[in-house]
Every structure is written in structure tokens, then in C-alpha cells.
Amino acid sequence: MDFNSSLRIAATGLHAQTARMRVIAENIANADSAGKAPGDEPYRRRIPTFQTSFDAEVGGRVVEVGRLAYDQSPFSSRFEPGHPAADENGYVQYPNVNTLIETVDMREAQRSYEANLNVVTVTRQMLGRTLDILRG
């Protein structure tokens, strides 16, 4: 595997983790987004999916961002009789987003991003040292 392949594989990892962090941020931003009227469904948590494939040009497996999946877990309900989206019993449905889980997922995505970034940094350093040796 050459330097370019390492860089390209790490770049796909960077792209995937960026997409993952974007979805997580959207989930956190909508954690309290209830419907506007009774019976309206609140925001449903999204889950990024990934798949790997063999890239013959790179000579290795790369990660690709797949479709967004929707978390099918139930919504939470809160008793808020004055809310515009309250049902006849005074309950409002809220998104199935747990900010603690999203925060942990965000931390994991950041660490994966940093690991791929370190691969890029080390590969660039190795490439620079190789060029220095060839010049010398």
C-alpha cells in the first residue's frame, strides 16, 4: 500500500465521521421538538449507516456513508395539558432522542475522526521524510 492509498482510505473515514457527527448534531438539536398540533408525530431519531467496499484503485477497503435509518423506538410522552400538541388526555409526544446517548455517540465519532486525521498526519510526515531522503 502506498502513501496515496493510505491518505484516500483515511479520507473516506474522515468523510464518514463528519456525516455521522452531522446527524448526531441534528438529533441533539431536535431532542425537544414536539409536534405543532395534536396527533402530529415528533422528530424521529436518525441513525447513520455505513458500509465498506473494496476499492481496487486504492487496494483496500473504504467506508461509505449509507442511508439514514430511523430509530423505531417509541416516543416519550409528557403531561403538558396547555401545550398546543397535547392530546385529549393532556399528553404530548416528544422525540425518541436521548441526549446522553447522542453525546456518547458524538464523542466516539470525534475520536474516530481524530484517529483518521492522525493517519493523514503521519502519512504526510512519512511522505515528507521520504522526499528528504531522496533529495539528500
Image: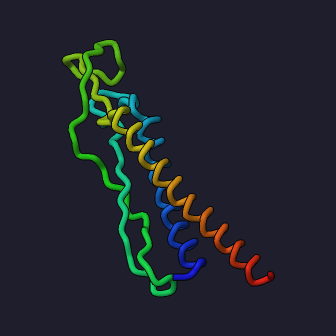
Q: Is residue 117 left or right of residue 51?
A: right
| Residue 55 drawn at (x, y percent) | 45, 82
Q: Relative to residue 37, is residue 64 depicted above or below?
A: below
Q: Please indicate, yes or no, whether residue 18 appears anywhere in the rendered image.
A: no
The residue that appears at 22% across and 41% down in the rendered structure is 73
Q: Residue furthest bottom?
A: 56
The residue that appears at 56% across and 59% down in the rendered structure is 118
Given residues 126 and 47, the one toward you in this image is 126
Q: Please indicate, yes or no, whether residue 26 appears anywhere in the rendered image.
A: yes
Q: Residue furthest top?
A: 82
Name the quadrant containing residue 106: top left
Q: Relative to residue 15, is residue 86 depicted above or below?
A: above
Name the quadrant containing residue 80: top left
The residue that appears at 21% across and 19% down in the rendered structure is 88
Given residues 114 and 123, the one toward you in this image is 123
Given residues 106 and 130, the one toward you in this image is 130
| Residue 52 drawn at (x, y percent) | 37, 71
Q: Relative to residue 78, is residue 52 depicted above or below?
A: below
| Residue 113 drawn at (x, y percent) | 51, 54
Q: Relative to residue 115, is residue 62 depicted above or below?
A: below
Applied colour scheme: rainbow
Of the 4 image quadrants, the one containing the C terminus is: bottom right
